[in-house]
Image (spheres, rainbow, N blue to C red):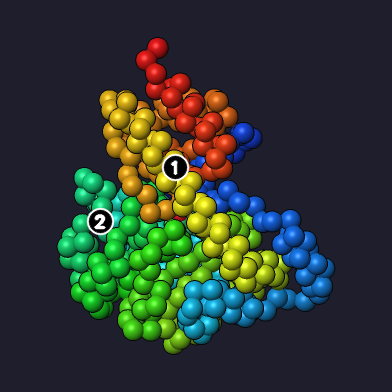
Amino acid sequence: MFRLPEKLTKLKPYDPITGSYAVRLDANESYFDLPQVLKAKIADQIEQISFNRYPDPVATEVIEAFADYYDIAPDCVTAGNGSDEIITLLLGTFMAKGQTLVTVSPDFSMYGVYASLSEINVVTVQKKENLQIDMDALISACQKANAVVFSNPCNPTSLGIPRSEVIRLIESAPDCMIIVDEAYMDFWDESVLDLVTKYENLVVLRTCSKAIGLAAARMGFAVMDPYKTGLLRAAKSPYNCDAISQKICATVLREKQILQHCRDEIIVQTQRLYTAAVELAQRYPDLLETVYAPRTNFIFIKTAYAKEIFEQLQAAGIAVRCFPHGLRICAGTRREQTLLISELEQILQPK
Ligand SMILES: *Cc1c(COP(=O)(O)O)cnc(C)c1O
């Protein structure tokens, strides 16, 4: 009888919130859509694509724009269909079946899913009570492991590990591949992107889905030394990034001023959201336990009432992300945040 493996049949589909909400603060996207002039420019360029031809397998134009924006060498960059594809690819090709990957918890949940599909053993190091990584414990776990992956700054906690601590890990575990997922590093300033040619065991991941504001276009990057970059490029499927996405992302990555302006605005809005949430937590300490100081474009609130608050916000047309011990709320426009805070206030008020 035809049998499918359990690693497949026990999978649960990724379950983003669907339906229509007046306010979407659940997916950590940028709240800026592209300016109309830029959309027109992109439309113009898309018109010139030969749709019958395969796209550039290396995504040269995107990689050059990306490398220029972050001031790194293009031959250290591999483009993928979102960093999700890059993660799958890295785990599936730079690791062998039965090897060990270290993850931390709480962190981005997809790492474990992709690892199990590649039949990789996962060892998870719990974070400390304050939700920070226990670096000594992580270094110790990495001594016996083949790779480690974590997000910095972290989704969902919004917290970051300083560059000096990441370097300590890289140097203390030279036989372990250190994969640092910097999906949110545009909002902080502790990147290790410049170190990929210094440390052979370092891989940095980036994406266009967050600060760059192109979640729709699906473009992510692995950054590592040119030798390993050549291997990853050889291992990926040749046409993983379509011609339309390549055009969109290359065009937008060249708009440095727009990108920096949007990033700065998002940081301001995140701080505003944080301040408002801290104020609510001070008024209702029994309901909202802790609001963490964010290094990202979202905040994380520790609360025993996550599910209740989440459901009431949902009923009011506001989508946030619910976790077992807290809520993750993404920065939105000033108007969206005002709506969110006043709704939260209603929910928390004694009835
Ligand atoms: C959003 C996110 C990604 C995602 O990205 P895509 O490039 O959209 O696939 C990767 N890692 C973390 C930690 C994220 O939060």
Q: Secondary structure at mark 1?
A: helix
Which mark sits nearer the N-terminus, 2 or 1? 2
Furthest residue to the bottom?
Answer: 227
**Quarter residue 151 falls in:** bottom left
* Residue at the image point whose x is 53% and y is 78% from the top: 67
* Residue at the image point whose x is 42% and y is 83% from the top: 225
Q: Looking at the image, which is closer to me, 310 or 192?
A: 192
Q: Is residue 123 left or right of residue 87?
A: left
**x and y percentages locating residue 76 in the rendered image:** 47, 82
Q: Looking at the image, which is closer to me, 285 or 2?
A: 285
Disc assigned to residue 133 = 2
**Quarter residue 228 falls in:** bottom left
The amino acid beneath tag 1 is Arg
Q: Are there few (<14), some (14-19), or many (20+) residues within 10 Å of tag 2?
A: many
Looking at the image, can residue 115 be seen?
no
Q: Which residue is mark 1?
A: 272
Q: Secondary structure at mark 2?
A: loop
The total of numbered circles placed on residues is 2
Whether 90 is drawn above or below 331: the answer is below
The amino acid beneath tag 2 is Ile
